[in-house]
């Protein structure tokens, strides 16, 4: 029996992978950070574009900066009034994802949350504010820093509640990684955050199984 169209499609995929396309698979959704090929399902062949997409013009950190604030309610907390860590992580991911989408103007999926440090408890009634900004961009990936503050609205006291670094990859309408604009660094603080992000990225690469 001769090969059908499905066989040819798989053959093309295998040939191009052998020609040097790295597989791109992220941790949370079946992808990995960096690379040019997306494979969401091991049993499904994926079309590969003949030519890589062009890199968009660069953008500054301020162009995608996000500030999200929300008052913590009883459903967000345990029976002692402490807001769940998972709630804070979800909100940090939402703010970070908004910054990534604003920078790339594309759909984005979460690759990794490098760390989540809870420095102070957050209580029912606190105003939780998350400030998210890009620290690093690869070809299709972006790292976002999310700084978390909790304000007691009755006293006005603001606490540094935590921080996190999250990684996203921009994807097109077919679920394939798509290039993102380079990050234009304007201050020494932004350059320092870029250098720290490069170190975290190198550690992630070394830690892959």
Image (spheres, rainbow, N blue to C red):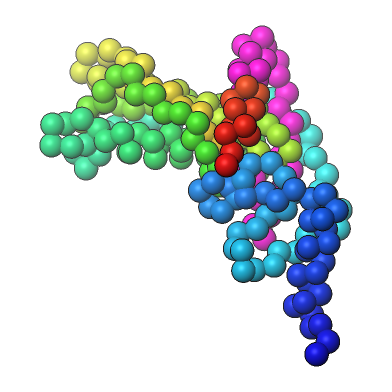
| Residue 160, x across and y down, in percent | 36, 16
In the visual, does 179 lie left or right of 91? right
Farthest front residue?
209
* Magenta residue span: 168-197
Q: Is residue 187 magenta?
A: yes
Any part of residue 203 in sight: yes
Any part of residue 132 in sight: no
| Residue 82, x across and y down, in percent | 20, 30
Report the label total.
Answer: 0
Residue in view at x 82 percent, y 66 percent: 12
Q: Quadrant of residue 77?
A: top left
In the visual, does 166 lie left or right of 59? left
Quarter of the figure with the C terminus = top right
| Residue 100, x across and y down, in percent | 59, 37
Above or below, 172 relative to 94: below
Farthest left residue?
79
Residue in view at x 52 percent, y 33 percent: 166
Quarter of the figure with the N terminus = bottom right
Above or below, 128 relative to 84: above
| Residue 173, x across and y down, in percent | 66, 58
Q: Is residue 120 magenta?
A: no
Above or below, 24 relative to 184: below
Farthest bottom residue?
1
Residue in view at x 33 percent, y 38 percent: 86
Residue in view at x 56 percent, y 53 percent: 30
In the depicted view, which residue is nearer to us: 147 or 39?
Answer: 39
In the depicted view, which residue is nearer to us: 100 or 138?
Answer: 138
């Amino acid at each position: 029996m001769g090969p059908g169209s499905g066989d040819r499609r798989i053959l093309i995929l295998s040939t191009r992978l052998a020609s040097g396309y790295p597989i791109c698979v992220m941790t949370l959704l079946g992808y990995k950070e960096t690379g040019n090929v997306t494979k969401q399902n091991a049993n499904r062949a994926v079309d590969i574009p003949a030519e890589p997409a062009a890199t968009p013009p660069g953008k500054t950190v301020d162009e995608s900066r996000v500030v999200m604030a929300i008052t913590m309610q009883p459903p967000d907390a345990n029976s002692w009034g402490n807001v769940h860590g998972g709630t804070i992580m979800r909100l940090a991911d939402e703010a970070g994802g908004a910054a990534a989408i604003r920078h790339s103007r594309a759909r984005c999926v979460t690759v990794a949350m490098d760390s989540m440090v809870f420095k102070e408890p957050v209580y029912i009634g606190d105003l939780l504010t998350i400030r998210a900004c890009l620290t690093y961009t690869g070809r299709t990936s972006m790292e976002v820093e999310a700084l978390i503050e909790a304000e007691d609205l009755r006293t006005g006291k603001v606490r540094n509640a935590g921080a996190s670094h999250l990684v996203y990859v921009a994807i097109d309408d077919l679920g394939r990684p798509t290039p993102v604009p380079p990050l234009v660094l304007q201050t020494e603080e932004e350059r320092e955050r870029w250098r720290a992000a490069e170190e975290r990225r190198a550690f992630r690469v070394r830690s892959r199984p």
